[in-house]
Image (spheres, rainbow, N blue to C red):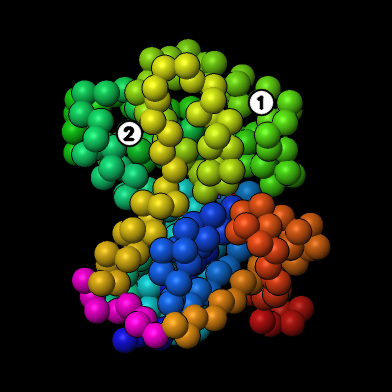
Amino acid sequence: MDKRPIGIFDSGIGGLTVANAIRKKLPNESLVYFGDTAHMPYGDKSPELIRHYSARIAHYLMTFNCKMIVIACNTASSHAYSTVAAVVGPDIPVVNVIDPVVDYVVKHHNKDKVGVIGTKGTIESRVYPRRIQKADKSIKVASLATPLLAPMIEEGFVNNMISRTVIHSYLDKTALRGIDALILGCTHYPLIRKEVASYYKNPVEILDSTLLVAEEVEQLLTEKAMLNDASSSSHRFMVSDYTEAFEKSTRLFFKEKLELTESRIWDNRSLG
Ligand code: DGL
């Protein structure tokens, strides 16, 4: 029985889709979530800066005595996985949102063409094609940066004419023609999963990382005998820059409105 919380972070509140999947799968586990709203979006930042931010956040999460860290952001997972692992040390497992999806694709899409959409940072890192093709050269990977999607979703533009137009104009691109599966390579995108699926007339499997990551978390905690058996969970949700708009948007990503507390880890206005 291990009552320590699971630390989860993202550039902002999009990673709450992952936190939500984890709390559903593992209701006994306590979560400490940190959204770096002071620096979002990460998708346009340099790999060095993302590593710098992620290292500081991992450090901060460890002050809550976390037993595991989940990087609930594709951009940070692409650039900062090893940095975070080095900060937390070998006894704390680190889960990223990319590997569980890559493993799934390798298992189920041999010889297929798989598309991946995500932020500029994620797509330019080529992390998905590199990891998929390292495991199975027969899988073709077509990548497309879709930088308008995360801000669009955060502003609440989902299931309407605007989101439909933006989504369709990206999915119409020639690079994505003839795909058998599409990876939603950003933790904001589960919110537009249905709209993406409805674009396709042929069967195209739409893959988001939330469920696969929650399963990976469960598997790792089970293997390491780190699960919390008692129902004593309590959660904490923090952001580096609080606004009411962020708090309101939590409902979109977590399916209920959350109370966000501000933790100013980047300056000394008042250290959280
Ligand atoms: N949630 C981030 C990701 O999964 C995208 C948002 C951002 O650019 O910060 O990559």
223 up-or-down from 98: above or below: below
**Is there any visible trace of residue 242 in the rendered image?**
yes
For label 2, count other residues whose C-alpha is less than 10 Å away and answer few (under 14), some (14-19) or many (20+). many
Contact (CB < 8 A) between labels 1 and 2? no
- At horizontal 61% and vertical 63% (from top left) the residue drawn is 35
Assign a secondary structure to mark 1. Answer: helix
Circle 2: residue type: Pro
**Is there any visible trace of residue 46 in the rendered image?**
no
- The residue segment tinted magenta is 223-230
- For the residue pair 22 and 48, the one nearer the viewer reads as 22
Q: Looking at the image, which residue sits at the far front?
A: 231
Residue 15: quadrant of the picture: bottom right
57 up-or-down from 271: above or below: above
For label 1, count other residues whose C-alpha is less than 10 Å away and answer few (under 14), some (14-19) or many (20+). some
Q: Does the residue labelled 2 lie within 8 Å of ligand 1?
A: no
Comparing labels 1 and 2, the label whose residue is closer to the camera = 1
Q: Main secondary structure of the magenta part?
A: loop
Residue at label 2?
129
